[in-house]
Image (spheres, rainbow, N blue to C red):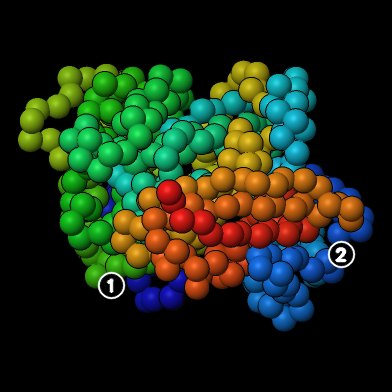
Amino acid sequence: MAATSWSKAALSQAVLGFWQLGPVAAREWTTRFPSLLGCQRRSVTCVAGGAFSGPLLASASRRYGQNSALDRFLGLSQPDSSLTSRIPAVSMHRDEQDLLLVHHPDMPENSRVLRVVLLGAPNAGKSTLSNQLLGRKVFPVSKKVHTTRCQALGVITEKEAQVILLDTPGLISPVKQKRHHLELSLLEDPWKSMESADLVVVLVDVSDKWTRKQLSPQVLQCLTQFSQVPSILVMNKVDCLKQKSVLLELTAALTEGVVNGKKLKLRQAFHSQPGTHCPSPAAKGSNTQSVGGPQRIGWPYFQEIFMLSALSQEDVKILKQYLLAQAQPGPWEFHSEVLTSQTPEEICANIIREKLLEHLPQEVPYNVQQKTIMWEEGPSGELVIVQKLLVPKESHVGHLISQIAEEAGRDLMDIFLCEVQLRLSVKLLN
């Protein structure tokens, strides 16, 4: 993210100038990295008989950050494990993943838990934020809308706290669901998620000039129906704004000038430290007041405001610490080794679909069908995947097949922490 003389924290101070700034007190989580014997400097084979290693792997390693599987394979230096939380991998074997999901949680006596629902319009950055919070990419991300097709679950476990993230599809209207022949789950899953939520994170893409000035009617309807559930506002992609002062008017509109029962005092002051959130005073009463006339464009019952870039690890770390601090006493729902409820095959299909969305034009990727032909462990412990892509026209995918498989293979290696051999083939739909 490019450095500027203006900072997000400064804007936070401008927006909420009468509140004392500063992130929620963070804990230092101590844990250890697992032993990864035999995993040093292993190359990864992807598609079409291609292989990549050496400089290409090192380049990919920089993409995925210090805690990526690629760094571990390459034997690159790791941060002090006493100060860094270990991020679980996902098993390549479905039966192991299924057993882990039903395994009795290994929780401490003072366990705490929080169920968080991420709401927002399509392409607001929910999956990107979820992946950053989890520390590993388990949800597909694309610039095209409706990349997330159904509710997916991620789990953050640090010390005694467990945060369960429900990454929902972007909220859409029944009209759009019918018009674009989308799955009914895209319409229903966000609402089902709200029934068990302890906290709602509403994500707004402030770089989108067409949608940023108001919350969508579907988000407002959801917040209104579940007004008893605490909510926070996350203004995402602030690094894309050239005129940072725009956030002042956006904040006023999206909150109706009120956060946690306090009116905002907007003032033109831009000087502070980067990467923070806008903390609010202690809550007074609940947010179950009468809500909503037909003209409502914002929500005056948010407890906190965060301004961040979901691609910034430092920004996301502040939000993550806030969520962990909000966890309430109660039993964990999952073992600490669980990262997601998705099966390995679902993760693989979603990652490949993400690449199709990224590389294929317009509506083409939405018409591609995926069929897994082989999923097995090779003689050296590598994961061998063969998937067939059924396409309306072979020209749509053929020349991109190698690149799609290579990129998907890198992502899968970082998820499963093992060597991955991914082969894709194309077949015309009958």
Q: Where is mark 2, residue-wise?
A: 40
Picture quarter containing residue 284? top left
Given the current orientation, which residue lies at the most extreme bottom position?
Answer: 55
In screen coordinates, is 365 left or right of 247? Answer: right
Relative height, residue 313 to residue 24 (above, below): below
Amino acid, disc 2: Gln
Relative height, residue 118 to residue 131 (above, below): above
- Say whether residue 179 is visible: yes
- The image shows residue 383 at horizontal and vertical percentages of 76, 52
Crowding near pointer 2: few (<14 within 10 Å), some, many (20+)? some
Which label number is shown at residue 242?
Answer: 1
Closer to the chain start, of discs 2 and 1, is 2
Picture quarter containing residue 45? bottom right
Tell me what residue is drawn at x 32 percent, y 56 percent.
363
Q: Give the alpha-carbon distance from disc 2 to disc 1, as whole Å.
A: 43 Å
Crowding near pointer 1: few (<14 within 10 Å), some, many (20+)? few
Tell me what residue is drawn at x 24 percent, y 25 percent.
224
Tell me what residue is drawn at x 48 percent, y 52 percent.
390
Relative height, residue 400 to residue 121 (above, below): below
